[in-house]
Image (cartoon, rainbow, N blue to C red):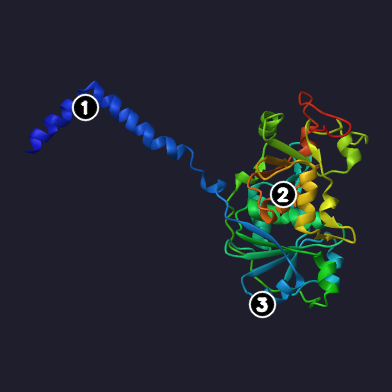
Amino acid sequence: MISGQKAIWKRLRSSKLFVIGLAIFSCLLITPMLHLPAWGNVSNSRIQFVSPNWVAENIKDPNLRILDVRNSPLDYIDGHLPGAVNVADIAFRGPREGLPVQYWDNRKLAEIFANSGVTNKSRVLVYSDGRDVLGASMVAYLLERSGVQNIAVLDGGYKGYAAASQTVTKVFPKYRPGQFTLRDNTSVRVSINEVKNLIGKKGVKFIDPRPADLFQGKENLWVRNGHIPGAKNIPWPTFTDPQNPHKLKSLDEIRKILADKKITADDDIIVSCSTGREATLQYVVLKHLLGYPKVRVYEGSWTEYSTYPDLPVATGPEEIS
């Protein structure tokens, strides 16, 4: 019986039709797998803006890690949220291949988060003060980029928290470094090569949150000045309260700002700024608070883009579409 089965299998393998059929079946099986995202591209992360009351309700959660990302250590020493760890937002960036203020490589980012007590199971709250809401949104973005699932930004920042008469302390927290394995989420960002291919493509919208004079190329700051052709200029402070840059305007107000610029949830949105920091606020708001499904950050931003002499540069006000 077995020898008969072997003979039949041998004749099948020698058949051209069998070989062709097997090849087609293999292609049908493998092709869908090629379109499945890799682990690093799958993101279930959530970033929310939370109130001082939310902090009061959650601050005793042993799984909550609080990052105070103010750049002045003396501000932290003078007073901070209970349990907060001070890690300045400037610690997350440095030079890379001649370019300044680029995000550190994954190994170093993982080390910073681990030394701050973050684990892969942590819930993380980020806050800052002064004009550094961008520091808070940047670190929140990097947490998502690194695979952290549950992230919050303190709406109103430290100023708003203290004004709400919530508890502050001068006591430093005691904790052990976390066991943190970085899971690189590449779906949140684009590279310079992707930017090259996306310029002028239908359905792609670039948002530039820099001040109007930088956007228009009026200031002689970089080697080449201006903006990516077709980009929409939405300066980042337009999303925040004029009296407190850490507090967002209502989502209805922000929706109107985007509608006036003809930016919709159907667009493939790339946010590009000066150094990859300003872009993170609009990234977080559009993707996580408004639910726009296709939003990414061009981390190199104008610092990198301006060094490529072959790339197109537009100056003056944005194009009217």
Residue type, numbered disc 3: Lys
Q: Quadrant of residue 128?
A: bottom right
Query: Dot 3, crowdedness within 10 Å: few (<14), some or many (≥20)?
Result: few
The mark that comes first in sequence, 3 or 2, is 3
Residue 310 point in image, percent of width and height: 76, 23
Residue 82 point in image, percent of width and height: 75, 75
The mark that comes first in sequence, 1 or 3, is 1
Query: Dot 1, crowdedness within 10 Å: few (<14), some or many (≥20)?
Result: few
Report the disc number at residue 202. none
User: Which of label 3 and label 2 is nearer to you?
Assistant: 2
Q: Secondary structure at mark 3?
A: loop
- Are the residues tagged 3 and 2 within 8 Å (C-beta)? no
Gap between marks 3 and 2 measured at Cα = 30 Å
Residue 52 point in image, percent of width and height: 76, 71
- For label 3, the residue is 60
Residue type, numbered disc 2: Tyr
User: Which of label 2 and label 1 is nearer to you?
Assistant: 2
